[in-house]
Image (tube, rainbow, N blue to C red):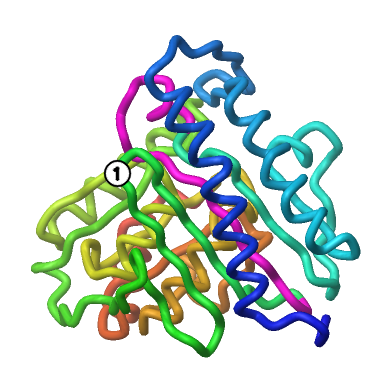
Amino acid sequence: MSSNYSLSEFLDVAVEAAKIAGEAIRRGFYETKHVEHKGVVDLVTETDKACEELIFDHLKKNFPTHKFIGEETSAALGTAELTDDPTWIVDPLDGTTNFVHGFPFICVSIGLTIEKVPTVGVVYNPIIGELFTGIRGQGAFLNGNPIKASQQTALVKSLLATEVGTVRDKSTVDATTNRINSLLFKVRSLRMSGSCALNLCGIACGRIDIFYELGFGGPWDVAGGAVIVLEAGGLVFDPHGGEFDIMSKRVAASNSHLKDVFLAALKEGEGSSSS
């Protein structure tokens, strides 16, 4: 590990980078958006690209030897492989569709892995003014105040978050809605905020009790939020059971009580549909 730096220095620089990008997002949020399509419903704006550059420039200036994986660069250059080196994994604007529509659930997500382990996380929503931070072994915070996952033990009283995803062929949509349909009989209600990173932070601060998403963009959606959930006493795992893999494009999270009942409910929701 880069022992000449402390984890708190990594966090401080990541927060600076998130705030620099956040300023650009705040400006862009109230202006006309220039939108490109990555897929049928997957969007990218000039702000996404500009913010990634701002973040990487700031991190590289401070940590020239570190590696980088980012949504826009990886999309252009092919997904980078995760190595043991300190690696910054960045989503410059999670919730692009929300951004385009002026729906204020958007954030900058910055995660640092060391030896492939998510170690530092920053998720910043510049529109609502919420900064979530976490350092492995040192707790999770919202605007500097400690946060904890919920204490809910009953699935039927739990608030569930998920996302539809960007793939809209019939079999994928059917599998998605069948799963949701099944879960709606078992939980209190459902939320789709449009941001994977903010959903994870919702688990961390107790707003949401359970969350899963299948087939999101890549490790940049989860690298920051995963640290924050774990440091808030929540759990991050694979929605099919088993260990969470940051590179797998699927994630589930819950408070410390609901994992097993939630996994069982997810499994029942698969029925004949497998993702």
Query: Whole-percent x and y of residue 184?
Result: 17, 52
Query: Whole-percent x and y of residue 56?
Result: 74, 47
Q: Nearer the viewer, residue 140 or 255?
A: 140
Looking at the image, the residue that sits furthest to the right is 65
User: What residue sits 55% from the left and 67% below the top?
Assistant: 121
Query: Whole-percent x and y of residue 134?
Result: 49, 74
User: What residue sits 43% from the left and 31% below the top?
Assistant: 26
- Examine the structure image and report whether residue 236 is included in the region drawn in magenta: no
Q: Is 258 on the left or on the right of 69, as rendered?
A: left
Query: Whole-percent x and y of residue 64?
Result: 88, 60
Start-end of magenta stretch? 96-115
Q: Secondary structure at mark 1?
A: loop
Q: Is 114 on the left or on the right of 44, as rendered?
A: right
Snapshot quadrant of residue 173: top left
Badge 1 crowding class, 10 Å Cα cut-off, few under 14, some 14 to 19, many 20 or more, is few
Q: Which residue is mark 1?
A: 128
Q: Nearer the viewer, residue 84 or 30?
A: 30
Q: Is residue 103 above or below residue 120?
A: above
How many numbered circles does the render carry?
Answer: 1
User: What residue sits 59% from the left and 56% below the top?
Assistant: 110
Quarter of the picture containing the N terminus is bottom right
- Examine the structure image and report whether residue 102 is included in the region drawn in magenta: yes
Q: Amino acid at mark 1?
A: Ile
Q: Is residue 136 above or below residue 11?
A: below
